[in-house]
Amino acid sequence: MYVDDLIITGARAEDIDSFKHEMVVCFRMSDLSALSYYLSIEVRQGKEALTLDQSAYTSKLLEQSGMAECKSCVTPMEERLKLTKTSTTAKVDATLYRSIIGGLRYLVHMRPDIAFAVGNVVAVSTCEAEYVAAATAACQAVWLRRLLGELTSVEAHPPALMVDNQPAIALAKNLVLHHRSKHIDGKFHFLRDCVAGGKIVIEFVETSR
């Protein structure tokens, strides 16, 4: 639930209908049927899959930042960019800048590939970068597994987390590789706990896939 927007879900349609009836009796509300849009997230429900998308939200952000006509690129930030305290460029609107950054951070839920470009995390190696990304994905996977278990009353199998970096996988599985993890914030070692506890199965996947 967010303010006055509510998503209702459950394992049995009868329970959902009963809850809706109770809510209608107590509150003035509208039933918009199957979920299709929620908090700037577009939802497409099919027989085989449920797809989440934020293309409209992305377009709005691009227009807001004056980049609606920009060209797409593989790397979502300028490569080898060096920041400096001294600059000759014109000052930007601080409020607008913060608004755009906040919007981009919300977009990370659907576009994890921009997480580094808009987040306070700096990795000193590819291994660390992949490890941090995997830890973030593991948090979401563990939460989804628990949610599905509550909805279906059946414990879901540990989700497979596909990582394309062998050193990062080794770091997640081997607790003695301290020399590779001394720069990593302790909160990202949640990934190790998930792997050790069988909550996540981490597997290697070729980058080309």
Image (cartoon, rainbow, N blue to C red):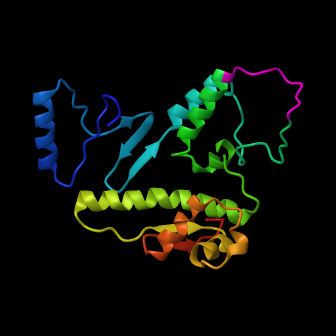
Task: Give coordinates of residue 37: x percent, y percent.
Answer: 38, 35
Where are the magenta residues, as a range? 85-94
- Quarter of the rendering occupied by the N terminus: top left
In the image, 19 versus 189, the foreground residue is 189
Q: Residue at horizontal 72%, vertical 57%?
A: 123
- Residue 201 in sight: no
- Residue 188 in sight: yes
Total count of labels: 0
Task: Give coordinates of residue 124: x percent, y percent.
Answer: 76, 59
Q: Residue at horizontal 59%, vertical 67%?
A: 163
| Residue 9 sits above or below residue 160 on the image | above
Residue 42 occupies which quadrant of the picture?
A: top left
Task: Give coordinates of residue 46: x percent, y percent.
Answer: 34, 50
In the image, 143 versus 189, the foreground residue is 189
Q: Main secondary structure of the magenta part?
A: loop
Residue 130 occupies which quadrant of the picture?
A: bottom right
Task: Give coordinates of residue 57: x percent, y percent.
Answer: 52, 32
- Quarter of the rendering occupied by the C terminus: bottom right
Residue 152 occupies which quadrant of the picture?
A: bottom left
